[in-house]
Amino acid sequence: MSLRKVVISGGGTGGHIFPAIAIANKIKEKYPDAEILFVGAEGKMEMEKVPKAGYKIEGLPIRGLQRKLTLKNLAVPFKLLASLRKAKKIMKSFQPDIAIGVGGYASAATIRVASKLGVPTLIQEQNGYPGITNKILGKRAKTICVAYDHLDRFFPAEKIVKTGNPVRSEVVQIDGKREEAFKHFNLDPSKKTLLVIGGSLGARTLNESIKVQIQKLIEKDVQIIWQCGKIYLNNLKPFVDELNSSNVFLSDFVYQMDLAYAAADIIVSRAGAISVSEVCLIGKPVILVPSPNVAEDHQTKNAMALVNENAAILVKDVDARENLVNEVISAMEDAKRCNELSSNIKKLGIPDATDRILVEIEKLIK
């Protein structure tokens, strides 16, 4: 048995794109001759990130409905039809052994066409609460790979396989990197260290919450590795310069996230599916601040899956400016609680998710 040709479709956000690339890399590792073609949505993030990872991508003109009333919504049905036509053309000329959907609008057209043409289909759902695309595709897909329990409310139970979320392996390998980490960030290994992971769109609340209460952290001699996101750097840099504290490392984006994780005693993060999967593998105490600006509030559901197992602390977005830093300090000063959180979150990590997904892919093409 060999995998010759694979289509992977989806995107729109890093939470869909990075798992897709991780799956592609795992296929390439075992089947170096396999041809992998990505299908994304024109103008979306995947059209840039996928070629950077070394894979070919075709774009569909597909668009989702805007939540507010706008003339753009009138074009949606036409773009959907055009996307279905183009997806059919791609499938017929490429002739894949399997089509994999990772969520996002492009996968809706691609997986639908693939299943109609008799191509085996698999979808990977990252969240504890599925997006609308995957809920619809769940009826058609042969296998549904998930990261959370209790998803039989949304999908046929017999199709569900719990595989975990694929994460970038280089990011979660932190053993033996502590010394290198403190050198890299120019921080003191003898001090308690907080890592704040603001993403691109979701960073605002986290940034404001740290900014208004940062003096409390400095007074407690806590160090901060603060990823603030590109659009906030110009605003925050003068503020941090003025603090004139060697305890604060500010950056728009931390490229060596493995080192940031290695240095951290406590992590503050949004609750996107991939972030949650990463922190489960890191196994350090984490405070999750779910973003309220995501479809169907799925970040709160991701966070609650950990909180219910006493594996994370939840701070609501609306309470963060007032409470986040207090929660950080209280956790830092409670070694017993930190050990409990650490031990419980480690139990939830699935380090071999890509291997498990590959096994399901192989079952389908047999």
Image (cartoon, rainbow, N blue to C red):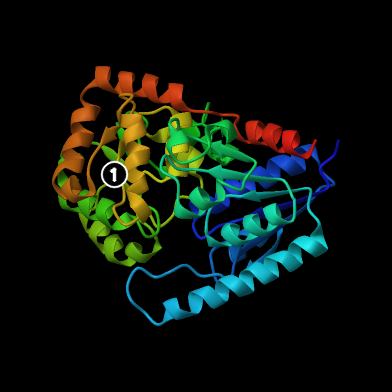
Front residue of 364/55: it is: 364
Return the x and y of residue 171 as percentages of the image width and height: 53, 39
Give the residue displayed 73% in from the left and 42% down from the top: 27
Q: Is residue 150 above or below residue 133?
A: above
Left or right position of 360 against 194: right
Nearer the observer, 365 or 209: 365
Q: Where does the image place residue 143, in percent across and percent down from the top left?
A: 62, 39
Residue 60 in sight here: no
Instruction: Identify the residue shown where x is 32% and y is 72%.
Output: 68
| Label 1 sits on residue | 289
Number of residues whose C-alpha sits closer than 10 Å to that of mark 1, classed few (under 14), some (14–19) or many (20 or more): many
Q: Residue furthest bottom?
A: 71
Whether residue 153 is situated above or below residue 215 in the rendered picture: above
Q: Quadrant of the N terminus?
A: top right
Looking at the rendered structure, the secondary structure element under dot 1 is: loop
Image quadrant occupied by the C terminus: top right
Out of 106 and 278, give the one closest to the viewer: 106
Image point (57%, 50%), residue name: 102
Q: Disc 1 marks which amino acid?
A: Val
Residue 286 drawn at (x, y percent): 33, 33
Count of numbered circles on the image: 1
Q: Is residue 206 above or below residue 341?
A: below
